[in-house]
Image (tube, rainbow, N blue to C red):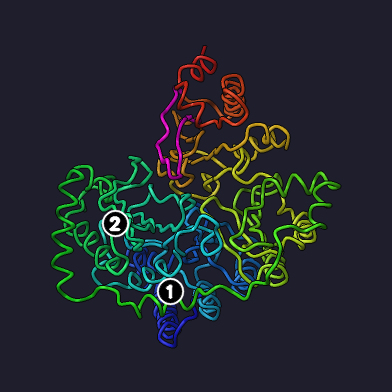
Amino acid sequence: MYQYSQQDHQLLLERVSQFRDQVQRRLKGELSEDEFKQHRLRNGLYLQLHAYMLRVAVPYGLISSDQMRTLAHIARKYDKGYGHFSTRQNIQYNWPKLEDVPAILDDLAAVEMHAIQTSGNCIRNTTSDPLAGVARDEIEDPRPYCELIRQWSTFHPELNFLPRKFKIAVSGSTQDRAAVAVHDVGLRLVKNDADELGLEVYVGGGLGRTPMIGKLIRPFLPVHDMLTYLEAILRVYNMEGRRDNLYKARIKILVHETGEDAFREKVEAEWERIKKSGLALRNQDIEGIKAHFKDPDYEELSDFDEAFDKEVITDPEFAKWAEKNLELHKKSGYRVVYLSLKSRNQPPGDVTADQMDAIADLADRYSLGQIRSTHRQNLVLTDVKLSELHDLWQELKALDLATPNYNHLTDIITCPGMDYCALATARSIPISQALTERFDAYDFINDLGDVSLNISGCINACGHHHVANIGILGVNKKGVEVYQITLGGSAREDASIGKIIGPAFTADEIVDAVGTLLDVYLEQREDASETFLETYRRIGQDPFKEKLYG
């Protein structure tokens, strides 16, 4: 992991001190809520439906065991005993008291964590592939480039009050596990014909009220030019983005209204001016950051383990989990383990303080002391020996973290909805739980295979429903919560926006409606290897619509 310098530590301490003073002034009535708003937003503090919500940054999803223990401590001491992992790989606390927030930030700073720029019209937490550094299909580890972006964007004086929030994702593998195409800027590490490392640059992706897939404005950008090119994009957006209309302020609208080619020309012209300043990354800049992400001392192991194979054969429950929640590792004898935060017993993405402490202990014992968070609201242990998987599984099962459903139907992305969020127009958590109750049968979800189901409680789409194979959007219609279905979305390398299939369903109807869609898929697929999305793209909406509406 990246280790903070003395300057990094000093910056955090000064920021906490500044915010402590701002909080005290607010509590004394010296600052109005409107005056305080921009201060709290820059420190990750939202005013939600029932209380404040604090969003803690988890840069590119990487958490040490010590950091996880601190997150558990905060949940236990300052909240209601749990936290919630979001689609930006961050963790949120839904019940902190305003007067306690500076103390929380102090505790975070002690383990090199913070809440800086997790809200407000600035560059938010940069996200990445949760398998970064260990994926077998990786071209280059994206974490050093994410860290460079973090350092460049934190408190950037020119980019701290943009027309609207700004989100960046970086991927280094052939598979896109970071939803690159639906970010304001998406970067994919690639190599050209000369085997030189560069970046594909996508701009103008995003969900919400006007969902769009990012446009490829540069197929190959040398990595040394990453920050200067990002700065050019942000300058064009800062100068020309809409500030008169909240709903048209994102860069996706600027790209759409300007036109892809014209926008590219503006960025390239600005980049030419910036390049003359000599601010390109040097080899020593990149290598200095890369040194923080060197491989640990892996053991030389075989990819065959007799004990593991025996447990798979003799323990059917373990075999089901191993089939669904394990991923190949770049090193023989190791596996990546997905910890499902999607059981029947707590809301999707939630994790209790006791679970967090236990996960930290498991990371130390089984996975070299590190944990990853994912944009699908799960956690990952990346470096587990094949020979230790059965022991780890038994402990995860006791913690309710071993539901075998990764990338399957009940691995549901779910926003907090109207249970917490002041912007929501419908509840999403109860619908997610009802769907899990209905379809939580291993044989059924195993037969369905790879299918994504996401739920949002309002048009802001924090649940990423637009890019799910089956998306559900909760809306309020004349005082009644109803749920609209979209089909055909994808957040992967074949990214697409789902299309609305027809009239919405009530809360009592939506689970049956999803069941009907699944029935159509099972009837229409060519064979068990054809996924839901492939079937949908082949046959179109009509068979689904006919079965749903008659």
Q: Nearer the viewer, residue 419 or 412?
A: 412
Mark 1 crowdedness (10 Å alpha carbons): few <14, some 14-19, many ≥20: many
Expressed as whole percent of the image width and height from the top left, the position of residue 22 reads 39, 75
Residue annotated with mark 2: 220
CA gap between label 1 and label 2 equals: 46 Å
Q: Nearer the viewer, residue 444 or 120?
A: 444
Q: Nearer the viewer, residue 32 or 235?
A: 235
Amino acid type at mark 1: Val
Residue located at (43% from left, 57% from top): 171
Mark 1 or 2: in front is: 2
Residue 65 versus residue 380 in the image, above or below: below
Amino acid type at mark 2: Phe
Tell me if label 1 and label 2 are in contact, CB under 8 Å: no
Is 499 situated left or right of 281 in this image?
right
Is 401 situated left or right of 34 in this image?
right
Secondary structure at numbered mark 2 = strand
Residue annotated with mark 1: 23
Expressed as whole percent of the image width and height from the top left, the position of residue 143 reads 46, 67
Secondary structure at numbered mark 1 = helix
Q: Residue furthest bottom?
A: 6
Residue 404 versus residue 1 in the image, above or below: above
Is 326 situated left or right of 53 in this image?
right
Magenta stretch? 483-503
Expressed as whole percent of the image width and height from the top left, the position of residue 326 reads 66, 52
Magenta stretch contains residue 486: yes
Is 204 situated left or right of 368 in this image?
left
